[in-house]
Image (spheres, grey):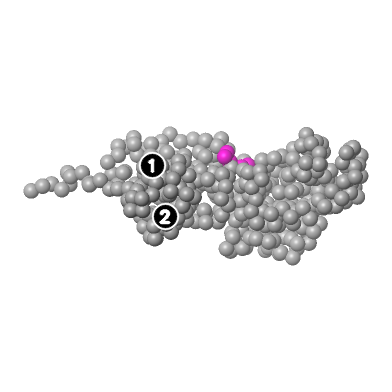
Amino acid sequence: MIQTTSIRPAKKFGPGYFIREQMELRDWTQEDLSEVSGFTIKHLNKVLQDKQALTLNMARVLGEIFNTTAQYWLNLDSSYRLWLLKDKTANEIEVDIKATIYERMPIKDMLSKKWLTPFGTASELEKQVLIFWDWKSLDFTQLDSDYLPYLTRKSDAYNQFNASYAITWYRKALIEAKKLDTVPYKKSELEILYNNLYSYTNKLNGIDLFLTELNKTGVLFLVLPHLQKTYLDGAAFLKGDNPVIVFTGRYKRIDNFWFTVAHEIAHVLLHLNKEIPFILDNLKTGELNTLEIEANELASIKLKHNEILDYLDSYLGYLSNSRVEECAAIYEIHPSIIIGKLAHDSKISYHNQSLYNENVLDLIPARYQRN
């Protein structure tokens, strides 16, 4: 009698095999599939060799191309990866666990920020990661299904790795926000405060005063540094019924703080809802979508950008500090906002942004700041 327990399981093929099979039926090259799918040749090559797990987005695209369900491709991938683990040594499994986690989370940066504690083994790291995400098992496809559908921007700032890093940052922001006390959100009071935002920019302790009033409207605020390979200036999301605004301090200028806050409040008022529960401004320079454009336009109105440009237009050839301060006094706006706007529109050199600009993190009360 053959002892079936000693028989090595038959080789299981990954999704790459079946993708190649579909390509052969259509006489397609990798270039053809790249053109149809929108994925790079490099990315496809890794998938075809089963060296890279499928994301939910890629499974959806494959389903559309080959007239199957996304679940079909996800099942093939998960079954294949479970099969791979059966004959691996303990050391190989440790390596796999670490590789999977490091691919989707910036572990070194999280350790330096003390979001994670030092670990000796992959199992110790895995335990911390499961607690961080509140998961029962290590399955990063949950990110693809629970978060990635909300990240609609198609840019380098949202490639597979940076999207996961941005989502990791968002998870930490959500964890910190859950610790904050709340009062009921009052949209009408936020709108009134937003209309007067400009007047706080030029007040002594204006940042502290504004954030105090912001919290009274039921909007929570905190500072959380961005993670490596992300381009986050700020974010807005919901904690239950309460909006949360987060500032990263990626740029520590006063004008950047006020514009980011004005921008995120615009998202709160215009865009946040149950269908769009969070918005991460993870954009490289020059990359905008409709939501960002709308938020920028409203923030510019509240910070009186048009009035600033109209007032100073005839002086731009010989703009003096006294003229900037005169404009600031007339429109009750911080001089750094004037300089920042002019530099952004290439009216003056970016070198001028050092004027009137302390490190804004020194002006934000410690009670709002997280590591």
Residue 62: image tag: 2
In the image, residue 7 sits, relative to residue 188, either above or below, namely above
Q: Is residue 251 left or right of residue 279?
A: right
Q: Residue at x 87, y 41 (%)?
A: 316
> Percent position (x, y) of residue 124?
42, 39
Q: Which residues are magenta?
A: 223-229
- Report which quarter residue 279 is drawn in: bottom right
Residue in the foreground of this view, choosing between 267 and 246 = 267
In the rendering, at what x and y percent does residue 275 appear?
A: 57, 63
Q: Main secondary structure of the magenta part?
A: loop
Side of 235 relative to 318 (left or right): left
Q: CA distance from mark 2 to mark 1?
A: 17 Å
Q: Are marks 2 and 1 in contact (CB under 8 Å)?
A: no
Q: Residues within 10 Å of mark 1 (few under 14, many from 20)?
A: few
Q: Does the segment drawn in magenta span residue 226?
A: yes
Instruction: Let me know if residue 340 appears in the view.
Output: no
In the picture of the structure, the residue carrying the numbered disc 1 is 51
In percent of the image, x 56 and y 44: which residue is there?
156
SS for callout 2: helix
> Which residue is found at the position 15% from the left and 48% from the top?
4
